[in-house]
Amino acid sequence: MQTSIILIVFLPLFAAIIGGILNKSMPSVVTKAVTTGALFVACALSWPIFLSFVSGDATATVVPVLQWMQSGDLTFDWALRVDTLTAVMLVVVTTVSALVHLYSWGYMEEEPDQPRFFAYLSLFTFAMLMLVTADNLVQMFFGWEGVGLASYLLIGFWFKKPSANAAAMKAFVVNRVGDLGFMLGIFGTFLVFGTVSIPEILAAAPGMSGASIGFLGYRANTMDVLCVLLFIGAMGKSAQLGLHTWLPDAMEGPTPVSALIHAATMVTAGVFMVCRLSPMFEAAPFALGLVTFIGAATCIFAATVGTTQWDIKRVIAYSTCSQLGYMFFAAGVGAYGAAMFHLFTHAFFKALLFLGAGSVIHAMHHEQDMRYYGALHKEIPFTFFAMLAGTLAITGVGVYHLGVGFAGFWSKDAILEVAYARGTELGQFAFWMGTFAALLTSFYSWRLMFLTFWGKPRWADSEHIQHAVHAGHDEPDEHNPPVQEDAGHDVTHHVPSPNYLAGTAGYHPHESPISMLIPLGILSIGAVLAGQLFAPTFLDSAAFWNGAIFYNEPLIHAMHATPYLVKYAAAIVMLLGLLAAWMAYIRDTSLPAKGAQQLGPVYRFFYNKWYFDELYERVFIRPSLWLGRQFWKLGDVGTIDRFGPNGAAWVVERGSVLAKRVQSGYVYSYALVMLLGLVAAITYVLV
Amino acid sequence: MEFPILSTMLIVPLVAGIACLFLPAATARLTALVATLVNLALGIALWLNYDIGGAQWQFTERADLFAVFDYALGIDGIALMLIMLSVFLMPICILASWDGIQKRVGEYMAAFLIMETLMIGVFAAQDMFLFYIFFEAGLIPMYLIIGVWGGDNRIYASYKFFLYTLLGSVVMLIAMMWMVNQAGTSDIPTLMQYDFAPGAQTWLWLAFFASFAVKMPMWPVHTWLPDAHVQAPTAGSVILAGVLLKLGGYGFIRFSLPMFPEASAQFLWLVFALSMVAVIYTSLVALVQHDMKKLIAYSSVAHMAIVTAGLFAFNVQGIEGAMMIMLGHGLVSGALFLCVGVIYDRLHTREIGRYGGLAINMPRYAFFFLLFTMASIGLPGTSNFVGEFLALAGVYEVSTWATLILTTGIILGAAYMLYLYRRVVFGIQKNADAAAMPDLSLREWAMLGPIAAAVLWMGVYPESFLAPMRADIAALEVRLARAAPAGDSGLAIGQPRDHAANYVAGAHAEGSVAAEGAH
């Protein structure tokens, strides 16, 4: 297993380095083959490890790599640790990453900079694997920042676009706010436990549950302080309410990136962290309450925004934010297994939805606005069925009494049940927020499906489609480079056909190439079966987790004993959401506009994402720049220089008439004076 | 007697420097490069022969000159690392000036070589007056480099540089003389163990602080730095940021802390307060700069603030972290100035707005610039992370407030550096002349490549750099222990709770479940 672990983690790094070095000196197919090949090998090595944990054959393994830092009592090394929790993450990361690599062969076909893209993807995978295999908090932070770097590079992949650059920078800086908490958390943990080794901390954590500590002049429960600080880090990476603003903007990156980083893997790092440190959090009741509250609040917040967005990727982005909220409140109420299970199923169905959306965007010539979609199910049937599988999974379709359901049914229902079963007020709050968010989830997911695949074509008004249609017979000119923007299809498709349908503008969407359809197919299988297959393992098996997370057996029993109404709550709201979406987007398509008008302020509040960006702009960004200018012009130039060196110069100038004979202005004379002074002084000392 | 390697390292650049004064341009360049490479080789030999865990002071040389004034050299691990930094950066500086400097080449190379002598002298001196001479004389070549080969406003900048740094030093000299008079020796190792009366320490500490704070530079005596950087030629900036800025920190670690432990503890609040102001203030100023060099200069002040705070944390992590930041910052800010120099050489402007979209025509340059940008904002795996992490971890043990404020530097640092990178490297190509610039030349590869390798080495395996300093810093911590502050965390271990936070009474026996879950 040791060799496998080393290979899994470092193959993507080597692939990234090779890709980076070769860059454009070789045909891009070389880099593509190397990176994709490395990831498929890593994936093939990961599944046996995971399955051996499922069967109970494997135990936690640590592979030492290299000494890292040793400073006084603070020592830690590079090491790869694989236990059950890590094994789950290994399969999630390598599987989605391998499929996204493959998908990108088709999606990025026309992109001139492909080696760079694939190298970044592999680099990201390496950093993510370092994160999940971390044996100490600092290595986790290494992975944490590494995925941040890769995310920055990939969001800004199209670096000529100002919006992409802004989004990339925003993602990095907002994440750094969370990192501030994470770093302080590590410092505090070292101060309290004298180590940053995760197993040692977790072993000692329960003994610290009664300790108190001073922080910023206040005294508080030690473990609460540490866990709140660490959780701030998790909030940044996992885009929880307050630090979520970067995630929707991150959709500026290519769609495969959104699927891999901003849905399936990186954004779940915060959840992973809380689960990894679960024995620590279990010693911190206040921190857990905060986790529950923030999770539940994010889950409802993001769902409300998701119902109003028009950009297909933004809808899915807010959906991701919302689903991460579920994972957090599951962890907050103590159901770490359920949180990880939802992370696991979500990785499949959300990657599927994103890649499906990518396939739609690809078919619709880069149009992302759902207002210009419609009637696509006949045009791109494979994508349609894949997206349908994803939608059935995320909305949690399943029947409790039959014991069948799509992936999301198993994990989301477990989370809602366990929140209810927890029996605290916060648990109740989370349950109701989660249930209401499930209603909204169903609504916005079906809204997305209906707007995209049902109804009549509304393509004609799309600039992108117009562009594609005209590119077919116009001479290519400076503004319309047809080859560059035309992703993966030949131009003849766009010649207006005789049976010219109103609304299509004569455009024919086309199904994506096979390299994109295979990942969709595989992920569809995951979205359908992942819940069914692994629910008993993740939720009910203390032996499976084997101490990798805090496993709360009585809570799981209580979860199974919840009333039927709770167990069917998600199914009921799913149907309500479906009904509402059907009413609004199939039966009477004038309803949404009417509703938006009736609900004016509320609609605008949701549509403008609760005005978080505007708030931060006014409270943080503009004041920072203003202060910077004041400090510079009034502080440095206006005060320090004015009364410092310039003042001295003024005095010197005034006195220069007298001093003219002494001040020759040559440096060597100053130096001479200094040396003379020195000699004189020493003589004085000696005599 | 052993081979006097330290004296050789002083003499080689000195002789070569004097020779350069009389040589034509092309020969002077070559002479300078060879001399600095020889010194680099000697430095490597020094490092390889340094006995980790051996005597505190190694390679000692001593010659009595007159009375208490001795020619005494010798290094500990701290000095070794700083000497390595100097000799490593020097050949790179010569390469950086290869094409950029066309007037008075011989004098220019001489100034650099003599400066190398003086810098090695500062770190190797074991006599306080010898230290002082090297410390102050180092100003002169730098003053000349800015004043003669600098930009348009070079006279003002060099005047400001000289005025600031000289004023501080005068007070320090007086304090030094008092100390020698009191202790009867100018031997630094002896003075490091000498216990001055606490009342006297206060004044001595302040006198030294006046000099080191300017050199550091600490807020509010930092305003000479941005001007000096902006006006200095590229290689001048590299040495200024890479080595001269480390003299202040070295002074604190060699003089202020071991010689005046009580006074250092007494003024801890001052150092922390100035450091905290500096991080916020200069980071925000950096955010609004239009001149690339000025931006990086302000960022240096912010980074150095974490050094001062780390040094005064009075614990191993803080001091080792501070040393690692000094080394890392020496490499990274030097490299960033080189990156500015690369495009300045092509377009002759430092105006950020004139560039844009360089990733298109200079992809390799974009890679190096990104690496150093990421190192500057302390990405783990690079040199600066090691330093910042350790230093801040050390400060946390003293003050949570200070740590919180100082750590905001990682947010602001990311903001101003990425904003810079975005405007210069990303975006569209706005100007035809910037779009036509060629990618890195072989000479530029030779400058940036070794620094990049060192930055990653220090980030991934810092043990190479920490190991030589470990014993010295441990000794310093012992020396400081009697004055070490208590810290505001005050951990009190109470009675642990019976149950985990999410305990739910279940069918199973309560105790066993709670115990099981608490693994």
Image (tube, coloured by chain):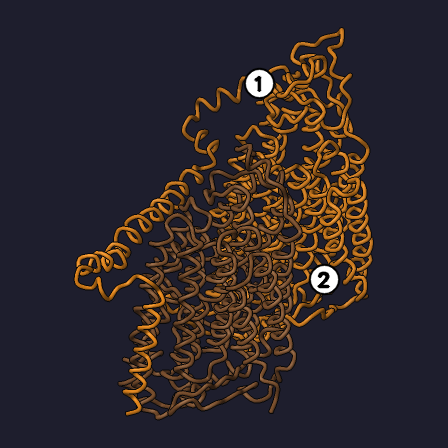
Q: Position of residue A513 (x, y in %)?
A: 79, 31
- The answer to which quarter of the image holds residue B499 is bottom right
Q: Secondary structure at mark 1?
A: loop
The C terminus of chain A lies in quadrant: bottom left
How many residues crowd mark 1 within 10 Å: few (<14), some (14–19), many (20+)?
some
Residue B337 drawn at (x, y percent): 51, 54
Mark 2 crowd level (few <14, some 14–19, many ≥20, 10 Å Cα): many
User: Which residue sits furthest top?
Assistant: A498
Separation of marks 2 and 1 at Cα, in angstroms = 49 Å
At horizontal 39% and vertical 82% (from top left) the residue drawn is B129
Q: Which chain is brown?
A: B
Q: Which mark is residue A589?
A: 1
| Residue that appears at 70% across and 60% down | A86
Label 2: element kind = helix
| Three-letter residue code for mark 1 | Thr
Identify which amino acid the numbered label 2 is placed on: Thr
Q: Toward the viewer: B398 or B492?
A: B398
Locate residue A155, reporting x and y percent: 60, 41
The subunit letter for the residue under badge 2 reads: A
Give the image quarter of residue A445: top right
User: Chain A appears in which tint?
Assistant: orange
- The answer to whether mark 2 and mark 1 are in CB contact below 8 A is no
Relative to A441, say whether B63 is above or below: below
Q: Which residue is mark 2?
A: A84
Instruction: Give the x, y percent position of residue A393.
Output: 69, 39
Please check whether the numbered discs 2 and 1 fall on a single chain: yes
**In the image, residue A171 above or below residue A667:** above
Q: Please tell me which of labels 2 and 1 falls first in the chain.
A: 2
Number of the label disc, if any, that sits on residue A632 = none
* Residue at screen point 29% across, 88% down: A685
Q: Dot 1 falls on which chain?
A: A
